[in-house]
Image (cartoon, rainbow, N blue to C red):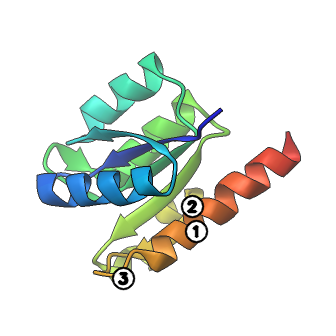
Amino acid sequence: MTDRILIVDSEESLRRRYEVELEEEGYDVVTAAGGHDALSKINDQLVDLVIVELQLSDGSGLEYLQQILDLKRDLKVVINTDDPTYKMDFHSWAADAFVLKSGDLAELKETIDALLHRKKLNR
């Protein structure tokens, strides 16, 4: 079974880039433009990992992070943002990982692989 990743980001070009690159890595990828859409997709589909930006067009990614975890406590979540100050906000500590946005997706891909691999080992 292929792992499914949900990408939550307001920027369509970034969602598309992440989608293409992660599909090339063998993942099944779904996207959401905002938190409301993400919550709906999490309710309707099996998702293994969520990548969430904290500055969403329809609200705070930190608030949606909490709602996501309230829905699916065991869901792996990676915060992916360009603002490093969020790492110091204790609300962000609920995520499994924090990755700064970069033109090179190597760190994000390594983080995803590590989180999903650990998850499979613990099943």
Q: Quadrant of residue 11?
A: bottom left
Disc 2: which residue: 112
- State the residue at coordinates (13%, 52%): 12
Label 3 vs label 2: CA separation?
Answer: 19 Å
Q: Earlier in the sequence, mark 3 or mark 1?
A: 3
Kindly identify the amino acid type of the residue bearing the numbered disc 1: Thr
Kindly identify the amino acid type of the residue bearing the numbered disc 2: Ile
- Whether residues under marks 3 and 2 lie with C-beta atoms below 8 angstroms apart, the answer is no
The one nearer the camera, 71 or 20, is: 20
Residue 80: percent from left, percent from top: 38, 66
- State the residue at coordinates (85%, 50%): 121
Residue 48: percent from left, percent from top: 58, 39
Quarter in which the N terminus is drawn: top right
Q: Which mark is residue 84?
A: 3
Label 3 vs label 1: CA separation?
Answer: 17 Å
Residue 51: percent from left, percent from top: 42, 54
Q: Quadrant of residue 54?
A: bottom left
- Whether residues under marks 1 and 2 lie with C-beta atoms below 8 angstroms apart, the answer is yes
Disc 1: which residue: 111
Badge 1 crowding class, 10 Å Cα cut-off, few under 14, some 14 to 19, many 20 or more, is: some
